């Protein structure tokens, strides 16, 4: 019997895992700089949280969720995104009663039943930031600046920030009506999905990836013209905030994002270098979600970045050089006595903070040293009976191909010095 990883999932290991770890280090470093703390929420939540939070008419809820049913217990769903869980945690743990804002980040797997293709998987990973407690545009700009600086720090080139405003409930109502009229007049030119969904949620049509629909949408009326005074002022203020931080952007009135909870600001960072799945980051303001989750009315804004798409850019633009495995010393051994000494010294060195490796396969010395080369160990020694009896060993510098004799009993001190 052999097994395969489920369709749309990937093992991450070998050279790739060093790249992932390096990127994760950057993400955590950025969050520390921007005073954002980590939150880890469960991988599954009550199904209803996503239905209400993400929105009944979204693609995610209507066709992409992994719903788990167990006889006798309530329905739970693998998280398709991170915001709903963070919002639930904010309310359940009364974080709103603490001094605001509450700034949270997560690095999490997410699950969506989609057709796998480059940059689109069924289990993928998101880096997300959520800021709760402010309605002000400066907070939208703060979230955007975190995403911007993250992409910058990773070194990603040629990426565009697109912003838009969907307005508040009233503006949305007004726009939905105008958009419905427009779509109604073009209904025959749309894909089947859109013909069906435009009645319930016309905004979804703007988000459709079908080429036919994209063509129609080009001429759709702009949501920005439906913004009321306050929403318009909010959007203008956001632009000022971004200008103030010298963050470049373009206004794109067709951006609506795939989730229902957005109000006012929405934004995306898009690359044209990784094919059709070019959106590496999406976010926006969602002032109704916290109250929807049973908390007090609370301003909120956030984003999520797709890490698989980030990694595609990291690789194609060759942005990060990793050192790979970092082995300080390989301890070769001859015979049983030699092995026991190698094992005890190896353990001592590891406890002292030195990355040490020794043979556990009972290989020949020649094979051991070949392996030491392969794992790119900085130093190596070989311990046999005479090394133990005379307290002497040759310390070989594998990179310089030079060696010198040292006392076996002073190996640890020697290495500590060499490593600093
Ligand atoms: P798309 O339009 O590409 O389907 P989305 O609007 O569904 O994206 P969000 O729900 O906003 O995306 O998720 C934020 C980010 O997560 C996306 O910009 C993308 O980088 C990433 N992402 C979303 N779905 C997937 C997936 N199935 N596989 C890999 N990454 C994904
Ligand atoms: Mg999607």
Image (tube, rainbow, N blue to C red):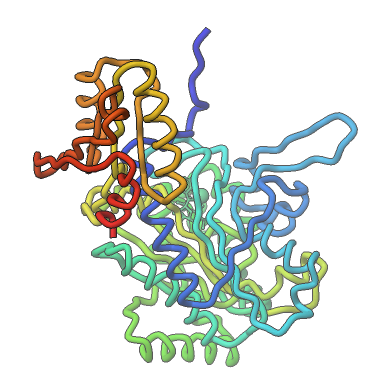
Q: In front here: 253 or 322? A: 322
Which residue appears at 42% of the width and 25% of the height? 340
Which residue appears at 29% of the width and 28% of the height? 383
From the viewer's perspective, tell me whether residue 230 is left or right of residue 303.
right
From the viewer's perspective, tell me whether residue 150 is left or right of residue 156.
right
Residue that extends furthest to the right in the rendered view of this protein:
72
Which residue appears at 30% of the width and 44% of the height? 411
Task: Give coordinates of residue 242: x percent, y percent.
Answer: 40, 85
Q: Identify whether 397 is placed above or below 243.
A: above
Residue 293, by quadrant, is bottom right
Task: Give coordinates of residue 40: x percent, y percent.
Answer: 64, 56
- Image quarter in which the C terminus is found: bottom left
From the viewer's perspective, tell me whether residue 330 is left or right of residue 230.
left
From the viewer's perspective, tell me whether residue 49 is left or right of residue 39.
right
Task: Give coordinates of residue 97: x percent, y percent.
Answer: 79, 80
Residue that extends furthest to the top in the rendered view of this protein:
1
Residue 362, by quadrant, is top left
Q: In front here: 144 or 229? A: 144
Q: Identify whether 159 is placed above or below 402.
A: below
Task: Give coordinates of residue 206: x percent, y percent.
Answer: 49, 60
Q: Identify whether 383 is placed above or below 240.
A: above
The answer to whether residue 200 is visible is: no
């Amino acid at each position: 019997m052999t097994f395969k990883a489920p369709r749309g999932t990937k093992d991450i290991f070998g050279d790739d895992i060093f790249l992932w770890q390096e990127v994760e280090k950057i993400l955590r470093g950025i969050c520390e700089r921007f005073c954002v703390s980590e939150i880890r929420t469960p991988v599954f939540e009550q199904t209803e949280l996503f239905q209400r939070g993400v929105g009944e008419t979204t693609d995610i809820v209507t066709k992409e969720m992994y719903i788990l049913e167990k006889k006798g217990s309530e329905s739970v769903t693998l998280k398709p995104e991170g915001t709903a869980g963070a919002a639930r945690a904010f309310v359940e743990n009364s974080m709103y009663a603490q001094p605001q804002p509450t700034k949270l980040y997560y690095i999490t797997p997410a699950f969506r039943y989609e057709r796998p293709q480059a940059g689109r998987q069924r289990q993928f990973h998101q880096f997300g930031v959520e800021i709760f407690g402010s309605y002000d545009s400066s907070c939208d700009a703060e979230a955007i600046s975190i995403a911007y600086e993250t992409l910058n720090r990773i070194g990603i080139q040629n990426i565009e920030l697109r912003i838009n405003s969907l307005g508040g409930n009233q503006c949305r109502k007004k726009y939905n009506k105008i958009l419905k009229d427009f779509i109604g007049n073009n209904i025959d030119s749309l894909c089947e999905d859109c013909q069906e969904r435009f009645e319930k949620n016309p905004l979804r049509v703007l988000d459709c990836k079908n080429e036919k629909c994209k063509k129609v949408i080009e001429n759709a009326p702009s949501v920005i013209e439906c913004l009321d005074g306050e929403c318009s002022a909010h959007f203008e203020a956001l632009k000022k905030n971004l200008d103030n931080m010298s963050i470049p952007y373009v206004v794109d009135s067709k951006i609506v994002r795939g989730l229902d909870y957005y109000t006012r600001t929405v934004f995306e960072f898009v690359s044209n270098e990784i094919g059709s799945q070019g959106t590496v980051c999406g976010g926006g303001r969602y002032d109704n979600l916290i109250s929807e989750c049973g908390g007090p009315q609370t301003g909120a804004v956030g984003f999520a970045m797709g890490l698989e798409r980030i990694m595609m850019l990291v690789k194609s633009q060759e942005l990060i050089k990793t050192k790979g495995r970092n082995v300080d010393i390989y301890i070769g051994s001859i015979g049983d006595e030699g092995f026991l000494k190698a094992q005890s010294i190896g353990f001592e060195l590891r406890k002292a903070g030195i990355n040490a490796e020794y043979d556990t396969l009972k290989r020949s010395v020649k094979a051991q040293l070949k392996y030491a080369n392969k794992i790119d160990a900085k130093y190596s020694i070989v311990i046999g009976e005479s090394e133990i009896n005379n307290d002497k060993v040759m310390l070989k510098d594998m990179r310089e191909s030079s060696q010198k004799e040292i006392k076996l009993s002073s190996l640890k001190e020697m290495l500590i010095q060499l490593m600093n």
